[in-house]
């Protein structure tokens, strides 16, 4: 039975009334410098995990501390990885179970890097809460606790069971997490009906969105060698077929000027754009000029918003990353590199599978090499790959998220994808076999990973409302 | 009046008789570890300079020690550069004056690098004198002293005046030398009629040669940028024209598969091959198979000896050296590099001038860029250049060298060029305005700069004879 509108109002009013308290709690979290990449901050990471455990327990969750083994440092030493939190709130077999994922660690930050304020002291300026982790991902994690606490205080029954997975190594490759999850597939993860992750950002600054797709990746090496060692270009130049010459030609045969991929049949395995999908792109809040200006690009490969977004989200792209083995320093060196490795990758989308893409790419490289007719040694390598992720943005999970956003923001959210990969998304989908939704709270200008990271106070509060409303919308 | 044959025999017999003594002197020189690139060996460099000064004085030369100022080290400290020796032997206004150049410093060497013997202890194995500097360039420098000493002992008047320039920074870019020479252009260098330099190698192992040409160089950067900073290839891939894509295409438009340069009109400014020159290449002692095997090349761009040698010596070549700003480490990085700098160079030959080549190359790059029509930022840069050097291998200097070789080896030498540059050659030619000849003493397998550097005892002795004979052949 749907929850009456007054209940939502009651909850939203309470959240508004307690917002200063919520900001204070975020300030506590930001003050713990849980930088996962810095071994000297490892005790802060543990502190942050235990602080969060208490917060979860304060709303009645049962929390397991999962020890996560050792981390091998570059200097050969080993230290303990921060533990992972597995929390449970509610165990009613008649209710659905929502799994919530978030992370407690942050990127490094120092005032000297160009911060206007102390990064580990949450500071409000013009309604913006500046501090490392404010938006990535402490704000969203704590918003869950606030949402639950308000529902409890107002005695509104939560219509679902909740499970929590909070880690503290996300900014360092989520070391150990997938293994821990896999290990608990048939125990802790059993019975999860849907997953909600708040660890990405709105496409713009003004309109909320739900994210239903991520591209996968296929990364390739092309190794070409022409001699046993680097040669002097004066002494040997003009006598041997140079490996760089071959490699540059091969790499020049991968894309058109506008980035269109020249690998035969590659577009045949891309899911066709549906009319429905096309329609949806029209309303998306995205300004091409602003996008271009933000990165100071000199041009874009397409002239409409729809084309640019589709190119980033739902079509494959190919980027040449660089060359290993050639001269790469500043200045001049007169070398004929003997062995060079060109590196490029394709971002892949449904319905492409890494296996199919590998075959098409390697076949293309082999055909090019045959066409080249060079006596040099050639080795194409499929280095690594990861699947694309695509959710059904019309399922119950997304529907609840969308209705919650409509209640809070007064508009239907945009449905977005992202061009990159968030491997944990796929892991949750694979291990639970159920819907995963990305529900961003922060805006595109929050500067996650950068100097002056912030979360707007209004988004922190509206995000908390959204999460509470999402839970209520899941009532059957 | 030519010197009678008996005089040559007298001299050669004396050199043969004293060969063990000459080897002993070379052993002394090799024992001084005059590694110019190692500041801690600077006192050894000075020791080596002073040792050589004594040797020159022992044959009656007047030697000036030219202080060479300071060297700035990478750590910011400064140390004294080793002094340069300017020597004079003979001052007869009726005689021609020959300038002899050589260097006293050596490349670094350590037993652990893979030497079979102590690199700083000259060790004879099967007629090969192993030791750092044996062939590069202590053996040839000392051979001059022996040649003069034998002529004096046998009371054979030297038909020319001699001047010596011996430096101890050649392996470290000859720091200070050109400036010192320029400073003495109208004093010490005045009246020099020809220069002889023994600091290169035979083309093969069996037949002596005289070297009359070096290629010059024109080095280019192509800078392309597409954004203000490196971008994530997942998030941005497919939306902007990528700088790497543009650069790879530009670089792919520089040469054909076989290395033929695609820059319009570039071959129009190359001196045509004369019938005489063509004829000369036929007899040159050069084995393509051995050349290919030595560097373990998988192929050569031409199928005849003449073509390969001409491609290395008297035609321009273009090599792509690498790219700055792209990913160049091992492993995988999913980056769209924002600013990349492609680096390539042309080896140039007569009659190409750097000015003409710069114009053709930059025009070509600009035309390609226009054709590409990319909105990215593009900057072609002519980074540095050096002229080619070509001597008249039929002049008096070369004629004397060739006759000397014929006397010692029983065959006419090959006339060779080298594909690289030896900047000091051009400096001597420019500052004296007269003939410069490269007269190599060591063979192609002497492993200069590498482990197990050696000079064959027979070549050391025959080289000494050649230098003595060269002086005698200069009699008018």
Image (cartoon, coloured by chain):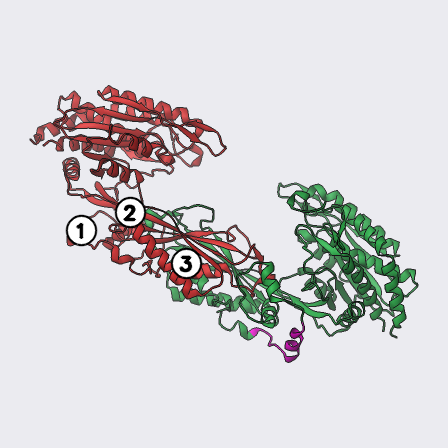
Chain colours: A red, B green
Residue A277 bears which disc, if any?
1
Q: Residues within 10 Å of mark 1 (few under 14, many from 20)?
A: few
- Residue stretch in magenta: B269-283
Q: Residue at x 29, y 46 (%)?
A: A387
Residue B376 or residue A320, whichever sits in front: A320
Q: Are the residues flagged by discs 2 and 3 in contact, CB closer than 8 Å?
A: no
Q: Secondary structure at mark 1?
A: helix
- Badge 1 or badge 2: first in the primary sequence: 2
Q: Secondary structure at mark 2?
A: loop
Residue A215 bears which disc, if any?
2
- Quarter the C terminus of chain B occupies: bottom right
- Quarter the N terminus of chain B occupies: bottom right
Residue A83 horizontal side relative to residue B195, left or right: left
**Chain of the residue under the numbered disc 3 shown in the image:** A
**Chain of the residue under the numbered disc 2 shown in the image:** A
Q: Residue at x 17, y 22 (%)?
A: A152
Q: Position of residue A332 (x, y in %)?
A: 55, 55
- Badge 2 or badge 3: first in the primary sequence: 2
- Badge 1 or badge 3: first in the primary sequence: 3
Q: Position of residue B123 (x, y in %)?
A: 76, 49
Residue A251 bears which disc, if any?
3
Q: Secondary structure at mark 3?
A: helix
Residue B356 or residue A332, whichever sits in front: A332
Query: Alpha-carbon distance for marks 2 and 3?
Result: 22 Å
| Residue A18 visible | no
Residue B82 horizontal side relative to residue B60, left or right: left
Residue B27 or residue A36, whichever sits in front: B27
Q: Residue A457 occupies which quadrant of the picture?
A: top left
């Amino acid at each position: 039975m749907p929850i009456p509108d007054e209940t939502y109002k009651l909850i939203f009013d309470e959240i508004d009334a307690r917002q200063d308290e919520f900001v204070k709690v975020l300030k506590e979290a930001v003050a713990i410098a849980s930088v996962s990449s810095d071994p000297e901050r490892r005790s802060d990471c543990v502190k942050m995990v235990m602080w969060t455990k208490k917060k979860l327990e304060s709303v009645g969750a049962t929390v397991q501390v999962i020890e996560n083994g050792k981390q091998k440092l570059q200097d050969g030493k080993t230290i303990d990885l921060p533990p992972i939190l597995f929390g449970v709130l509610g165990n009613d077999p008649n209710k659905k179970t929502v799994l919530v994922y978030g992370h407690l660690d942050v990127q490094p930050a120092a005032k000297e890097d160009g911060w206007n304020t102390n990064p580990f002291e949450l500071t409000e300026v013009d309604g913006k809460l500046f501090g490392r982790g404010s938006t990535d991902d402490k704000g969203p994690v704590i918003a869950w606790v606030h949402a639950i606490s308000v529902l409890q205080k107002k005695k509104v029954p939560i219509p679902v069971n909740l499970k929590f997975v909070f880690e503290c190594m996300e900014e360092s490759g989520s070391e150990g997490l997938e293994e821990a999850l896999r290990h608990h597939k048939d125990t802790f993860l059993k019975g999860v009906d849907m997953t909600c992750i708040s660890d990405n950002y709105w496409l713009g600054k003004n309109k909320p969105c739900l994210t239903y797709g991520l591209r996968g990746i296929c990364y390739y090496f092309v190794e070409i060698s022409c001699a046993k060692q680097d040669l002097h270009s004066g002494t040997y130049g003009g006598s041997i077929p140079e490996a760089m010459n071959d490699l540059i030609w091969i790499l020049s045969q991968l894309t058109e000027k506008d980035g269109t991929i020249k690998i035969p049949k590659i577009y045949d395995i891309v899911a066709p754009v549906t009319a429905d999908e096309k329609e949806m792109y029209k309303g998306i809040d995205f300004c091409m000029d602003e996008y271009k200006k933000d990165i100071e690009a000199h041009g874009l490969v397409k002239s409409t918003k729809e084309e640019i977004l589709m190119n980033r989200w739902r079509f494959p792209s190919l980027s040449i990353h660089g060359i290993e083995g050639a001269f790469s320093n500043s200045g001049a060196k007169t070398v004929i590199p003997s062995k060079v490795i060109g590196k490029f990758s394709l971002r892949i989308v449904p319905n492409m599978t890494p296996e199919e893409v590998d075959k098409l790419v390697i076949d293309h490289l082999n055909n090019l090499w045959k066409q080249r007719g060079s006596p040099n040694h050639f080795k194409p390598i499929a280095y690594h790959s990861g699947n694309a992720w695509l959710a059904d943005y019309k399922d119950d999970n997304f529907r609840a998220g969308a209705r919650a956003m409509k209640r809070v923001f007064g508009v239907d959210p945009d449905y977005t994808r992202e061009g990159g990969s968030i491997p944990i998304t796929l892991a949750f989908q694979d291990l639970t076999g159920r819907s995963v939704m990305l529900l961003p709270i922060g805006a595109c200008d929050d500067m996650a990973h950068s100097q002056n990271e912030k979360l707007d106070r209004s988004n922190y509060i509206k995000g908390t409302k959204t999460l509470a409303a999402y839970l209520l919308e899941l009532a059957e």
